[in-house]
Amino acid sequence: MTKNSITAAAVSLLALGLALGVNPAMAAKMDASIGMQLEPPNLDPTGGAAAAIDEVVYANVFEGLTRFGSDGAILPALASSWEISEDGLTYTFKLQEGVKFHDGSDFNADDVKFSLDRARGADSTNAQKALFADIASVDVVDPATVKVTLSKPNGSFLFNMAWGDAVIVAPETAADNAAKPVGTGPFSFTEWVKGDRVELGRFAGYWGTPVKLDKVTFKFISDPTAAFAAMMAGDIDAYPTFPAPENLVQFESDPRFSVIIGSSEGETILGMNNKKPPLDNIKVRQAIAHAIDRQAIIDGAMFGYGTPIGTHFAPHNPAYVDLTAQSAYDPEQSKALLAEAGVSDLTLSLKLPPPSYARRGGEIIAAELREVGINVDITNVEWAQWLDDVFKAKNFDLTIVSHTEPMDIGIYARDDYYFQYGDPAFKAIMADLDKATDPAKRTELMQAAQKKIADDYVNAYLFQLARTGVTSAKLKGIWPNSPTQANDMTGVYWEG
């Protein structure tokens, strides 16, 4: 073929494309690749504690009766509306109609009953089973109506139903959701290549507002250097929680990218095993808290991104109380408290999961504790090891982790929780909070709860994790803040 004939053919193809309304240069991109540092251990939010599960499937694949909005508001989801009885014990939910699961089966009230009964059952593996503890019964009124009766009023019930742990699943597919999730969301599961990625595709049968992307790929890149390289090369379109804050200044100066700095629900703590001697002594825990310079950790591990906290509560919440002064950095007081406790030559284990805030922060904390006479043996563990050894088996002295669940101070009332606090007075505060519906009273109780765990030095409270995200400049709709542990792709689209 001659050069002229090639040119003529190209012109013909271009003319055909224009006639059909297709302009390759103008065609909108219909897929997005999202970076995550941690790979989820499974894809069933009702059967695992790892935040990475919800980061992939929350609102994308699975939906609950209610859901969190980008601003933290509680919104209708599979429940279109609800009525609450005057005594606060009965919630009657009207369900969305015409909803289908990804396998084509119909969603109805029977699925809601199955899901809630399963989550609260004696053999439940739900990591947040406490969310369902006040449910006395779940009754199907008709296919589009379900009645939930509580054993006592719970002012947080609609909030609890918005968690990823409370999504609605089908009895036919629930057992296989860990590897092949089937939900009602706008994206359906396509493929999971272990160690690399999870792929989701647009669900054509979605009941609600259609999403704008045809495909979403979640890529798992644990190494911060590799994450930076992937963003720079265009292999990743967005990294909503970027693992290398030291690189953000480079992205800010590059017009190809947008840097998004927002808030998260992530209270980052130095968790302490309250039942393991000598950490069962409040003076030892207090000494550890006073040995830590929060700002040094924020600057050294997070390059200045983060807000110091003195209790387990998000600073952007209107009920937050700033208690940082109560555990201010004071090495001399730390030494005195250890002496009062009769503790010397103390060596503690520090088990660190993969996130950079933990690994980098752990090195700084270990050095600070050595300054007051506490030796630290650091062990770096993978996420699955952390869940098994620390979270489940409670085989640890110290650990660092960011608790990204929304307003989760209630975990301190759980006897079986990994830091093993379970104080009766704290439990009483939380029981009163569950019953309270008056906003002023709820604020008073939430502040009392914050003060109680700070007074007891249950853990050393470090900082609120900032949401430091990087996206392609033309990718819009990524949440700036993180009101729950999610990468909600339902409103994401390409501009131009």
Image (spheres, grey):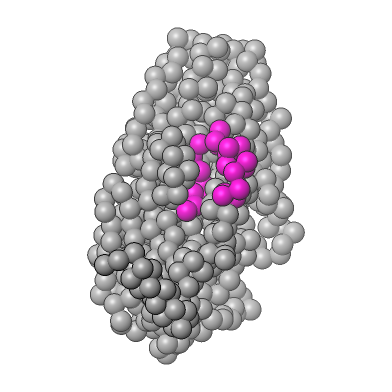
Residue drawn 68% across and 33% down?
324
Query: Residue 463: x percent and y percent?
Result: 60, 36
User: Residue at image x 55%, y 17%?
Assistant: 368
Name which quarter of the figure residue 394 lies in. top left
Please give the range of residues in magenta: 237-258
Count every numbered label the image shows and give the total: 0
Q: Quadrant of residue 300?
A: top right
Residue 452, image x, y percentages? 63, 40
As drawn, 45 above or below 361: below
Nearer to the camera, 330 or 217: 217
Q: Residue furthest right?
A: 440
- Identified at 30% across, 66% down, the residue is 2
Q: Quadrant of the N terminus?
A: bottom left
- For the question of whether residue 480 can be seen, the reply is yes
On screen, residue 182 above or below 83: above
Q: Tell me if 456 is positioned left or right of 353 in this view.
A: right
Residue at horizontal 66 percent and vertical 18 percent from the top: 330
Horizontal side of residue 116 vs 340, given as left or right: left
Residue 340 image offset from top left, x and y in percent: 58, 14
Residue 213 visible somewhere in the drawing: no
Q: Nearer the viewer, residue 161 or 340?
A: 161
Image quadrant in which the C terminus is located: bottom right
Q: Left or right: 34 with respect to 196?
A: right
Which x, y percent locates residue 316? 68, 49
